[in-house]
Amino acid sequence: MQGAIFTTFSEMIIEKMGMEQWNELLDKTAPISQGVYTKGELYEDSELINMVVALSEKTGISAEQLIQAFGEYLFTSLYESCPADISKITCLREFLLVIDGVIHVEVKRLHPNAYLPKFEYEGGENNELIMYYTSKRKLCHASIGLIYGAAKQFKETIKITQTECMHDGADRCKLVIDFQE
Ligand SMILES: [Zn+2]
């Protein structure tokens, strides 16, 4: 996983819980990187997952909820470093629709080693949009958090329901996004 994901994760923990908690997390999970992350480098996914599990044990908050909260936090930094020109995009739906075919294509061009999830789209009923998420990482809860983060960016209110999930044996996760008036 990209170093930028890890630097943002450490920022979030330090900001929300303090330096002591971050150091405790490093002591407990003993990452090979020793918790020193650089944006341009790649690190093992397991370092992040181990920290989430340790945090979940400590706080009693489920790993899924922690991952979703991190996704929401992460959105701002991903949005700010977005390599594609999205200046003309004015609403959440438009933004979500260009993630797979425009933004991720640019990210891939800049970071050929990055492994990115795949999104497929389907128009739902009325105010809905369906996004199918596929990734070997199965981090659908991070995607849900990221989409909520995007909604905040565009000042829109949404509700996401996951009706099928790779964790329950589905081929892809089905995220139903309900745009609320
Ligand atoms: Zn899922």
Image (cartoon, rainbow, N blue to C red):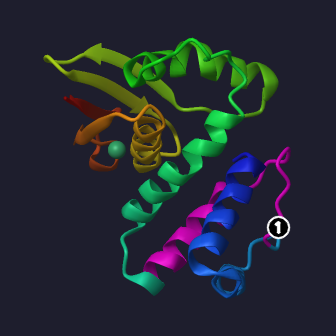
Q: Residue at x 68, y 51 (%)?
A: 5
Q: Residue furthest left?
A: 125
Question: Residue 96 placed where, x, y %?
Answer: 44, 23
Up the image or down, 5 lies above or below 103; here it is below
Question: Residue 48 placed where, x, y %?
Answer: 62, 63
Up the image or down, 78 lies above or below 103; here it is below
Magenta range is 35-57
Question: Residue 53 placed where, x, y %?
Answer: 50, 73
Q: Is residue 44 visible?
A: no
Side of 154 relative to 127 (left or right):
right
Specify whether residue 46 is painted magenta.
yes
Number of dots carrying numbers: 1
Q: Which residue is mark 1?
A: 33
Quarter of the view holding residue 144: top left
Specify whether residue 124 is painted magenta.
no
Question: Residue 149 placed where, x, y %?
Answer: 46, 43
Q: Residue at x 72, y 84 (%)?
A: 23
Quarter of the view holding residue 94: top left
Is the residue at mark 1 in contact range of ligand 1, meaning its CB lies under 8 Å from it?
A: no
168, 122: nearer the viewer: 122
128, 113: nearer the viewer: 128
Ligand 1 appears in which quadrant? Answer: top left
Judged from the image, the secondary structure of the residue bearing numbered disc 1 is: loop
Q: Quadrant of the C terminus?
A: top left
* Label 1 Cα neighbours within 10 Å, binned few <14 / some 14-19 / many ≥20: few
Q: Is residue 147 visible?
A: yes
Q: Residue at x 74, y 58 (%)?
A: 7
Q: Residue at x 27, y 37 (%)?
A: 158
Q: Which amino acid is tagged 1?
A: Ser
